[in-house]
Image (spheres, coloured by chain):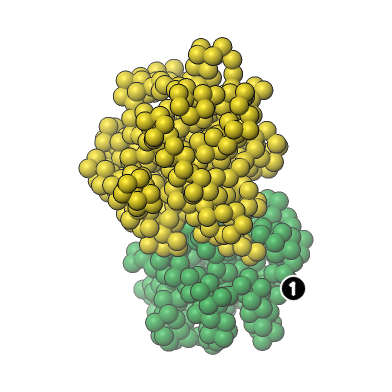
Amino acid sequence: MRLDGRFGRFGGTYVPEILMPALEQLEAAFLDAQEDPAFASELSALLADYAGRPTPLTRCRNLPSNIFLKREDLLHGGAHKTNQVLGQGLLAQRMGKTRLIAETGAGQHGVATAIVGALLGFETVIYMGAHDAERQALNVFRMRLMGAEVVPVESGGRGLKDAINEALRDWSASFETTHYLLGTAAGPHPFPLMVREFQRVIGREARAQMLDQLGRLPDAAIACVGGGSNAIGLFSDFIEDDVRLIGVEAAGKGLDGAEHGATLLRGRPGILHGAETYVLQDEDGQIAESWSVSAGLDYPAVGPEHAHLKDSGRATYVGATDVDALAAFKALATSEGILCAFESAHALAYALQLADEEPDSILLVGLSGRGDKDVAQAQQLLGPSA
Amino acid sequence: MNRYGAMFDRLAGAGGGAFGAFVMLGDPDLPGSARMLRQLVQGGADMIEVGIAFSDPVADGPVIQAAAKRALAAGVRVNDCFGLIAEFRADHPDVPVGILTYANLVVAGGRQHFFDRAASAGADSLLIADLPAREAAPWAEEMRRVGIDPVLIAAANTPAETLAAVASIGSGYTYCVTRAGITGTHAEARFDAALIEQLRGLGAAPPVYGFGISRPEHVRSALDAGAAGVICGSAIVACAAQGGDVAGLVARLKAATRNDSPPQ
Ligand SMILES: Cc1ncc(COP(=O)(O)O)c(C=O)c1O
């Protein structure tokens, strides 16, 4: 390995020895690609002409107008996930791999991986917790339409963490032909660093668009945090600026109980899925089952860079409950005509609260994905008359 | 000399290899697990490997995943596992006992505290499935200070520099894996004489083959490839789960470690 793969005390490569050569190969391919102008131009052409970048920055008209939405919901695939699967897909090609595997929670990352599998010609296998596959049936079908095989995972809580376990097991036996296209800025080095670099386009564009539209930077950048990829993508180009960085975790049914996904708020440092980071766990270190109305935030660990940003104080992390998120989802639909993902609704929920407290602050919200996948669930939760 | 050293010397003198038997502590429950440990010794196991169940065992196949699940469902806690080891140690003062587990259980209550508890229970070694050589040095240092041997993994795809680190950091024995992948019983395990030779050349702790050992012919070919011993996990765990004759299985596999065992 060329880099130490740490963010302060967090990160590292806590994987079985058998996987280390695969991580080393990936790190080398990523670092070489970063220096290769041909890679950069191929990726930016795909981002522009295939995926639809740049995405707009939309100022709210009927919700508080100090809220600006970075519209990753308009990206091809329906979420920010597409940014980084294109990057990793090109890397997999450079490494000569023929097969992609991925985990998915909400199904968004599975869909994004299926997209890149179809586009670049990989055999694609998606591991998805059986519980998530049930609540996101439409996304399962989308993946299959694009030629991916979807494997429901029955172990553990049948959620995102169990899908990652299964993908890691597959990769331990298949790395010679297979790239594990991890879906968020978590896991062992080099994933957190690589996914951040592929996602930082969100913040880079948003920063330029803020300067362009308003002539100034926002006071705060707000994003939801599941594994942490859209948040780190939004934050990275503001790290050196005087801009508050606020990550919104899933407070689920409330932070006082156990049914939430608020890893940074309620977890403690541990080691899961290859990284030292905050983890929801019991006293012995057994991993807890998380909960969120949004499958994509339902994960008991978090990317190690967020653990570092929290401990260093550079970013702050707050929670939004299922109820808060659903209210924000509805507000955005009725006031702005935008259906956002339940995940993104967590960021918006906190922004609405902050806009109330600070009417003069400019708030940049990462609208990480669109809500089509959540419409059936919203109908159940809100009732047919919405 | 520690228990591993004494065991390997004794077996080498007798012209044979070590047979290690793996079970998950607390599977299916605490009393059942204590009985199982006794059966392993009755069957002739030279060294015992015990798993401490983790909720997210990424290096394990379905058989050992299921064992971990049974132990956790029975309410088995990490402290109970140390209790089982201590009980076993009291009855069997000379049989080496190695712990296999995952990093988060080790750090959850403080790394040093885990090592202390392992040592006072009478364990001899600790293999952490998700701790590669790249991360292991400070952990190994702390283990050794309390008399626990850090066991590291060497695989056919492990690069030479990493093998050198495995050799210098690891002690007790070196856990060699037969193939890429996760634990489980596989029909065609391959044993790499070149890996063994490389490890011997680096002065690594005695190489012991694990992953996929389920039949006497696997045992024989692992030893023929130069290994100092073998560890059988999934086959034993599956046999126990089906209520089979575990001592009998261990005896059959152990018989294949003797130099006078019939050639395969
Ligand atoms: C729309 C959307 N936003 C956010 C997330 C959370 O992931 P991350 O924290 O990596 O951005 C997901 C995950 O599936 C998602 O689909």
Question: For chain A, what colour was chosen?
Answer: yellow
Q: Chain of mark 1?
A: B
Quarter of the image with the C terminus of chain B is: bottom left
Quarter of the image with the N terminus of chain B is: bottom right
How many neighbours does mark 1 have within 10 angstroms: few (below 14), some (14-19), or many (20 or more)? some
* Res. B54 visible in picture: yes
* Res. A6 visible in picture: no
The residue under label 1 is which amino acid type?
Ser
Residue shown at 67% from the left, 23% from the top: A242
Instruction: Identify whether B231 is placed above or below B154.
Output: below
> Which chain does green denote in the image?
B
Q: Position of residue A6 (x, y in %)?
A: 63, 39
Tally of numbered tags: 1
**In front of the other: A327 or B38:** A327
Instruction: Identify whether A359 is placed above or below A380.
Output: above
Check the image and name the residue furthest to the front.
Answer: A385
Q: Position of residue B259 (x, y in %)?
A: 48, 77
**In front of the other: B100 or A86:** A86
**In front of the other: A340 or B7:** A340
Residue shown at 63% from the left, 33% from the top: A357
Instruction: Identify whether A26 is placed above or below A128.
Output: above
Q: Position of residue A119 (x, y in %)?
A: 27, 32
**In front of the other: A17 or B63:** B63
Q: Secondary structure at mark 1?
A: helix
Residue position for label 1 = B120
For residue B197, side relative to residue B192 (left or right): right
